[in-house]
Amino acid sequence: MQGFNMGRYVPPEHEGTTSANKLAGKHALGARARKSGQGILTVRFEMPFPIWCTTCPKPTIIGQGVRFNAEKKKVGNYYSTPIYSFRMKHVSCGGPIEIRTDPKNTAYVVTEGAKKRDTGEDKVQEGEIRIRTEEERERSANDAFAALEGKVEDKKQAANDKSRIEELQQAKERDWDDPGEANRKLRRAFRAERKIRQKKEVLTEELKDRMSLGMDLLEETEEDRRRAGFVEFGEVGGDGAVVKAQSRPLFANGSKSGNALAKRVKTTKAALETDRRREKLRQELGNNTRAVLDPFLKAEKASTPSISSLRLIKRKRSSTESLEAPPPVKQDNVTPALVDYDSD
């Protein structure tokens, strides 16, 4: 029986004794193992940290996570752990880059063609404990000054750690001396906040139903309240709206409002009285013009022209003109509009 063999044919006489790759003289990994005789295997290597390429004419950084086709090769051992070398080619300049594993420090080391970017990760941060190597331990044991410096630093660190631990213990005793009471306080605060949230949700749903809004409304903020306070809404209907509409010009002018430009500081009563009369005359003329030209505005009372607005011409009477009344005008016979149905 042939069985599942990835589409490769194995003759019946060799079935079960060898594989199709051996019969074809190929490696199972294909082109990746073309240098398997030299102990080299092509793998996909991902850059563990950002590095600077030293082969490029200009400083070029290779970011963390960039992948390369690297040649993996065993170059040594650290005790029983093998040390591997990953050699790759930079696409921009074609220069080789080699990175090796460091089992001693559980890290990667750049050995050729680049240098690691200094991001400050190698420095000991607050709260971290740096593990000293065997060489540093031997040097501190043999050097009295190094041992003294280490003791002073350890004492300072121990004092800082002790004060911090005491603060944490005091906070724990203060907040969690009675776990039931602490739990009760948390639940009470959560219950009050939950009622407020539910009330806001009900008001929001009512607003959405009233305004027919099909979107989610965010919570009102102080900025929204401040900006809404700047909005002024005019009157809707009433005599005040009619008066304001009559006072506006029929056609808008590009110039600014006269009130804004006419604001000046008056020092005498005569100047104030003159301005008041001028403003009153301007409003009256504007209202009359608006009422005459706008057919859609219906005034409650029809405006009658004043005597001052009529143009009067004084004509001298001639001496020959008769003072008698004019003769009556003779009217023609008018045909009656109605017909007597009783007549023939």
Image: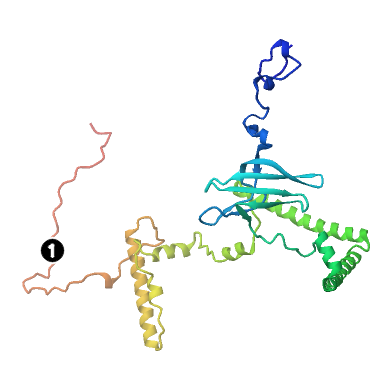
Q: Across the whole image, how many numbered discs are drawn on residues?
A: 1
Screen quadrant of the C terminus: top left
User: Few, some or many C-alpha atoms within 10 Å of disc 1 (few <14, some 14-19, many ≥20)?
Assistant: few
Screen quadrant of the N terminus: top right
Left or right placement of residue 283 versus residue 334 in this view: right
Q: Quadrant of residue 45?
A: top right
* Residue sitting nearer the eye, 93 or 229: 93
Residue drawn where x is 39% and y is 64% of the image? 246
Q: How is the image coloured?
A: rainbow
Percent across and percent down for residue 84 are: 71, 44
Above/below status of 80 relative to 10: below
Element marked by disc 1: loop
Residue sitting at the far left? 320
Does any portion of residue 132 appear in the rendered image?
no
Does any portion of residue 331 appear in the rendered image?
yes
Kind of residue indicated by mark 1: Pro
Percent across and percent down for residue 323 are: 12, 70
Q: Quadrant of residue 261?
A: bottom left
Left or right placement of residue 165 versus residue 37 in this view: right
* Residue sitting nearer the eye, 282 or 177: 177
Above/below status of 276 relative to 55: below
Residue drawn where x is 36% and y is 79% of the image? 277
Left or right placement of residue 220 versus residue 140 in this view: left
* Residue sitting nearer the eye, 35 or 62: 35
Q: Quadrant of residue 262?
A: bottom left
Residue drawn where x is 53% and y is 64% of the image? 231
Q: Which residue is mark 1?
A: 326
Percent across and percent down for residue 22 are: 69, 22
Percent across and percent down for residue 340 are: 26, 37
Left or right placement of residue 8 versus residue 124 in this view: left
